[in-house]
Amino acid sequence: MMRFRGVLACCSFILVTLLGAGAIADAERLQSALEVLTDMAGSQDRGIPNDLIQQARCLVIIPGVKKAALGFGGQYGRGYMTCRRPEGQGWSAPAGVRVEGGSVGFQIGASETDVILIVRNQPGVDRLLSSRFTVGVDAAVAAGPVGRRASAETDATMRAEILAYSHSRGVFAGIALQGATLRDDTDENQQLYGSAASNREIVTGNVAVPEDAKAFMAEVGKY
């Protein structure tokens, strides 16, 4: 009985910590996503190489992925994806993305990490636009090269469908979302577009960019 109560307390701690990540209004989240892109790609010497973004088929930007653990681990975050439109028409309107995941083992503590995924080819796009997929299981994912190291490391990542970048306290790290599940955030899409449209409908259709998202999309266009 005591063990059960301990597990219940652990789960309650994780649930309260992670659900707090979803309480931000979409305008704030869009601004956070804009700032994450600026921070992680704004420096040629120590950021995400611009040429990799220029070659991307889709971008996924998730500010402040929450991780919490007290015996059992979990992670939660909400962000946006945008994909290239055909024939040089620029980037699609943004669609909401929700990331969820868990882990088992002795862990304790909490952290917050900004994440960018660069989807490099059509198989990666197809997986991203499925109802849900698991990073590192349903798609070939590699930690992306940073800054001037890119030219030396790009060959090693050419087979990856997705390049993953995680950024915590100003430092790039490995693949933060390994094993996490990504799916459509229909609640966010409802707020942005007035309907719970699927991400496929938004990024492959002729959907206008909402007023609240124009600054974010202008930042994406810079790269």
Image: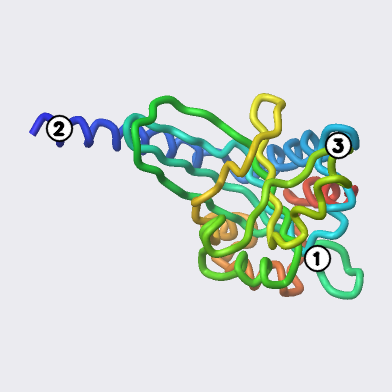
Amino acid type for the residue under numbered disc 2? Arg
Above or below, comparing residue 77 to residue 84 in the picture:
above
Q: Which residue is rendered at x = 59% and y = 63% of the image?
A: 139
Q: Which residue is rendered at x = 88% and y = 47% of the image?
A: 151
- Helix, strand or loop status at disc 3: loop
Q: Which residue is rendered at x = 68% and y = 46% of the image?
A: 143
Res 158 visible = yes
Res 28 visible = no
The image shows residue 168 at horizontal and vertical percentages of: 64, 30
Amino acid type for the residue under numbered disc 3? Gly
- Helix, strand or loop status at disc 2: helix
Q: Are marks 1 and 3 in contact (CB under 8 Å)?
A: no
Q: From the viewer's side, name the closer residue of 209 and 172.
A: 172
Instruction: Name the residue beneath numbered marker 2.
Output: 3
**Of marks 2 and 3, which one's residue comes earlier in the chain?**
2
Q: From the viewer's side, name the closer residue of 17 and 25.
A: 17
Nearer the observer, disc 2 or disc 1?
A: 2
Alpha carbon distance from label 2 to label 3: 49 Å
Instruction: Name the residue beneath numbered marker 1.
Output: 84
Amino acid type for the residue under numbered disc 1? Arg
Quadrant of the snapshot with the N terminus: top left
Alpha carbon distance from label 1 to label 3: 20 Å
- Helix, strand or loop status at disc 1: loop
The image shows residue 218 at horizontal and vertical percentages of: 85, 49
For the residue carrying disc 2, how many other residues have a C-alpha within 10 Å: few (<14), some (14-19), or many (20+)?
A: few
Instruction: Name the residue beneath numbered marker 3.
Output: 42
For the residue carrying disc 1, how many other residues have a C-alpha within 10 Å: few (<14), some (14-19), or many (20+)?
A: some
